Image (cartoon, grey):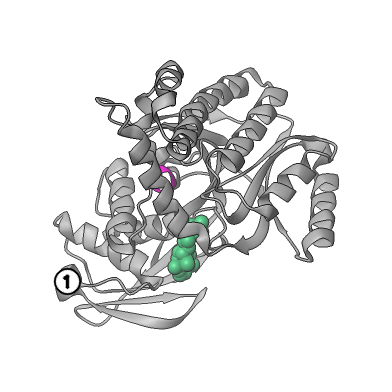
Amino acid sequence: MAVAQGVTAFHAPGRVNLIGEHTDYNGGFVLPAALSLGCTISVSPAQAGKLVLKSKQMPGTVEVDIASILDAQPRKHWSDYVIGVAREIASLGFVIEPATLEIDATVPTGSGLSSSAALEVATAFALLNGRPLEKLEIAKLCQRAERNFVGMPCGIMDQYASVFGAAQHAILLDCRELTHQLVPIPDGVELVAVNTMVKHELGSSAYRQRVAECAEALSHFPGKPTLRDVTLGELERTAASIPEIPLARARHIVLECWRVLQFHEAAQAGDLERMGRLFVESHRSLQHDYEVSCEELDYLVDTALTIPGCYGARMTGGGFGGCTVNLIKSSELENFEKAIAARYKERFNIDATIIRCKPSAGAGPVE
Ligand code: ADP
Ligand code: MG
């Protein structure tokens, strides 16, 4: 993208999570890839003492007084993501310079591809405007912004993937250690996201409820800092004393962490069939044990599995709508896209958008 003189710009990608859903806030493993879609913010001068925020995707202009940024209150408005990040940066001792931030994103919002983290991370880069800060600190401050100011008790996956993404690779992230390794995507296969175009209201309240249910499950394992630290054997031995719902949630987390590591092995071996089977097992677990799927997502997964060239399919992101991610043989890509869109239209009378996911680099300045 070309940038006008006197203006600098920063880009941060969205992400598609390949496997490891809802495990991040349990200290577990996740395996996302940064997308070529993301959020770009152009930074230009503004009146002294002001931050001026505009988004091509949202109406209105928001003006913020920098002097009182630490006293700002969330308004349940898109600008909360930006102001939340500005507050965290100011809390680290950086001076927030007056600026106009013009936001323009290509990642669809509210679809499970993390437009929110793309916005947060692009904002952090824009406000730092070249001042150095460790990448991990950037991911963490963006997560704090979403947790503390937006009010969503999220894990670190989205912000971490947006910062540390790498071209042609997914990343295996250990959310307890906050370290990652790159995972090459085998040849001959494409990652395709199919957007249900729905977002059920239940989503954010159910997310909080799952966080609470996981905490309840964890209370049955004294001395374990997170559910990720619970082994399958320990879960089996304790199962009889855990109520049904927290037990099902814990079963999802413990097995999902195991599946991420299995998926990593399968990817290294180029075993597409096994990668696909793990996708499906992950989806079934999210559908039945974690209960964060919905009719539209289940239909897309069940239908994808009947289309030639589909190794596996699963919901991706928090659930209750948004996207599925599909592992598709390259030579069958176009057929698959046509078939899944037609079947979805026939069933729900909705045009699903199809997004070819090209694993891409993490956030940085726009050349
Ligand atoms: P997801 O991260 O899966 O896309 P979220 O519900 O976590 O969904 O975040 C979506 C919210 O992020 C939007 O409702 C909006 O408040 C904010 N947002 C994302 N992208 C933009 C944008 N380009 N401009 C303004 N706000 C945005
Ligand atoms: Mg989000």
Disc 1 marks which residue? 71
Q: Horizontal and vertical percent for residue 326?
A: 69, 41
Q: Is 190 placed above or below 142 here?
A: above
Q: Is 247 placed above or below 92 here?
A: above
- Name the residue type under label 1: Asp
Q: Is residue 129 visible?
A: yes
Q: Is residue 5 visible?
A: no
Helix, strand or loop for the magenta stretch, by majority: helix
Rendered image quadrant of residue 220: top left
Residue drawn at x 15%, y 74% is: 67
Whether residue 159 appears in magenta in the rendering, the answer is yes
Q: Is 349 placed above or below 196 here?
A: below
Q: Nearer the viewer, residue 126 or 72?
A: 72
| Stretch in magenta | 156-160
Q: Horizontal and vertical percent for residue 192?
A: 69, 45
Q: Horizontal and vertical percent for residue 18?
A: 57, 38
Q: From the viewer's perspective, tell me whether residue 204 is left or right of residue 339.
A: left
Under 8 Å from ligand 1: the CB of mark 1?
Answer: no
Q: From the viewer's perspective, tell me whether residue 161 is left or right of residue 170.
A: left
Q: How many callouts does the rendering have? A: 1
Element under disc 1 = helix
Q: Nearer the viewer, residue 269 or 45?
A: 269
